[in-house]
Image: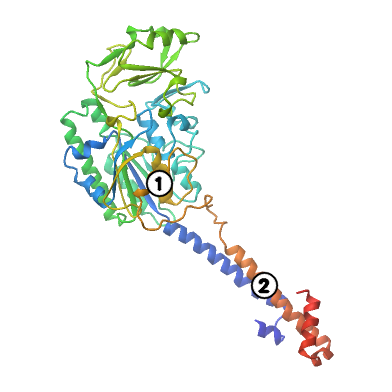
């Protein structure tokens, strides 16, 4: 190019364009390369929940597939779920890292006095985004960071939260088999690079349903547990068939455990207080009581010492370690049954031989936790963790910045492989990759080359117009040109 200029073979404008066009092309190639690199190298993570799978089920009967995951990865013996130990609150805690009082899904059945609306997991009220938008689930966070997510029946994943569904999701339908759910998840992870999901969540209703009906101590549960282990084996085989087994980080856990109940351990509220004085908001073993206007003192007074097998709290007196005070959806009076006891209004209501929702520090309420994959250590056993610690761990694995949460990565970082992990960005990367350094580098190079072009061009013009300057010594000509250009 400079040779062409010196020979006078092209105009200055043509030369300038010839210099800048390659720079623009280089910048585009660099940006395209960053996008391809981000898609290719983004870690993969699949979170699986077997509802109500208690921590000790894996040692109760042969569970070879759980043992494979443990031997190839990690296990945590004791996991403290969020209070209350119910399905919806804990599944939202797992994907937000927040206690129920903060993320707002405080129970399976709720009343919000600000909205003047009721929520039930059994009705379409669960699809109202207003119940969910006190927090941001991980599938929304990763999509805002430029990634993709897939959800197969996870509670809340078929709700448009903060204006966004998961990239791929299934509308909740309990009749859809576990195998069908797995097949869809595998499809989403196996899609072409630009379409494949990076984070997936998979939910299965068992062994919770059987645990409620038969109770965790029933021998019937042995077969149910074996069936869950076989389902895990099916998932692992499908990952292998798809070539994903060594690529996808797999976490298998649950929302809570299960406690045995007895028809001999029933508390009937009708014996102590009239139904006309309050509204029953959530079910046993933790019951929200909303007294009628002006009836708080009367209702609380009748309940507080009524039965030694239940604790009755004013909202402001709920123990701090439950993290279950600071939300309008938590009722003014909370009744908590002791382990194994059931609270009813009277015995005409349905009774279950197994239940959960009790104090989250009870061993019977603790879920299973095993994980394997490139991010995890091998054959490592950890004593304890909190379920809210899982969220910052998952964000670290996915290399995205976590939102404020109640968990701690330090509490669970020992689960991770000693291999280097990608650094978490200081801010969530945007899809358009504006954070690339290519524009800066291109601009600097462009300015430098244009200045160089001008130096050569002006030198040639000056030499042609001032012949006498050609005969001056080098010591005189260089300072003159430099002075004229203010270099």
* Mark 1 and mark 2 residues within 8 Å of each other at the beta carbon: no
Q: Secondary structure at mark 2?
A: helix
Which numbered circle lies on residue 394?
A: 1
User: Position of 57 compared to 46: left or right?
Assistant: left
In percent of the image, x 69 and y 74: which residue is there? 16
Q: CA distance from mark 1 to mark 2?
A: 44 Å
Above or below for 346 versus 423: above
- How many residues crowd around disc 1 within 10 Å: few (fewer than 14), some, or many (20 or more)? many
Above or below for 159 versus 372: above
182 or 115, which is in the foreground? 115
Above or below for 398 versus 133: below
Quadrant (top left/top right/bottom left/bottom right) for the C terminus: bottom right
Q: Secondary structure at mark 1?
A: helix
User: Position of 453 compared to 355: left or right?
Assistant: right
User: Position of 62 compared to 431: left or right?
Assistant: left
User: Which residue corresponds to mark 2?
Assistant: 448
Residue 212 at x, y percent in the picture: 25, 26
């Amino acid at each position: 190019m400079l040779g062409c200029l010196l020979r006078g073979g092209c105009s200055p404008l043509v030369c300038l364009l010839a210099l800048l066009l390659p720079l623009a092309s280089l910048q585009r190639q660099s940006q395209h390369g960053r996008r391809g690199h981000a898609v290719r190298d983004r870690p993969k993570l699949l979170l699986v929940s077997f509802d109500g799978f208690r921590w000790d089920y894996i040692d109760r009967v042969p569970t070879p597939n759980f043992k494979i995951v443990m031997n190839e990865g990690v296990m945590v013996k004791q996991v403290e779920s969020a209070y209350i130990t119910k399905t919806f609150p804990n599944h939202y805690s797992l994907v937000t890292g927040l206690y129920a009082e903060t993320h707002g899904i405080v129970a399976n059945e709720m009343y919000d006095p600000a909205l003047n609306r009721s929520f039930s997991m059994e009705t379409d009220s669960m699809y109202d985004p207003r119940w969910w938008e006190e927090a941001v689930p991980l599938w929304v966070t990763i999509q805002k960071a430029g990634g993709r997510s897939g959800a197969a029946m996870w509670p809340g994943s078929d709700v448009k939260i903060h204006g966004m569904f998961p990239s791929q999701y299934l509308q909740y339908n309990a009749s859809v088999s576990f195998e069908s759910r797995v097949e869809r998840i595998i499809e989403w992870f196996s899609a072409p690079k630009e379409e494949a999901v990076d984070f997936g969540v998979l939910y299965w209703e068992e062994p919770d349903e059987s645990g409620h009906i038969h109770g965790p101590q029933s021998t019937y549960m042995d077969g149910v547990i074996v069936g869950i282990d076989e389902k895990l084996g099916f998932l692992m085989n499908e990952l292998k068939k798809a070539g994903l087994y060594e690529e996808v980080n797999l976490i298998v856990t649950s929302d809570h455990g299960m406690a045995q109940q007895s028809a001999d351990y029933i508390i009937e509220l009708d014996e102590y207080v009239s139904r006309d004085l309050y509204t029953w908001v959530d079910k046993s073993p933790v019951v929200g009581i909303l007294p009628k206007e002006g009836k708080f003192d009367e209702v609380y007074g009748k309940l507080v010492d009524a039965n030694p097998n239940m604790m009755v709290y004013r909202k402001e007196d709920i123990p701090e370690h439950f993290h279950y005070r600071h939300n309008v959806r938590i009722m003014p009076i909370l009744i908590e049954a002791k382990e194994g006891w059931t609270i009813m209004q009277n015995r005409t209501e349905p009774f279950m031989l197994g239940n959960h929702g009790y104090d989250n520090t009870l061993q019977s309420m603790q879920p299973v936790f095993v994980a394997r994959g490139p991010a995890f250590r091998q054959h490592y056993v950890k004593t304890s963790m909190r379920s809210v610690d899982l969220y910052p761990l998952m964000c670290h694995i996915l290399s995205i910045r976590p939102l404020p949460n109640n968990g701690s990565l330090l509490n669970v970082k020992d689960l991770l492989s000693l291999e280097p992990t990608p650094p978490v960005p200081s801010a969530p990367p945007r899809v358009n990759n504006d954070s690339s350094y290519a524009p800066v580098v291109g601009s600097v190079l462009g300015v430098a080359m244009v200045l160089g072009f001008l130096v050569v061009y002006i030198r040639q013009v000056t030499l042609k117009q001032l012949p006498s300057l050609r005969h001056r010594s080098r010591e005189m000509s260089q300072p003159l040109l430099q002075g004229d250009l203010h270099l």
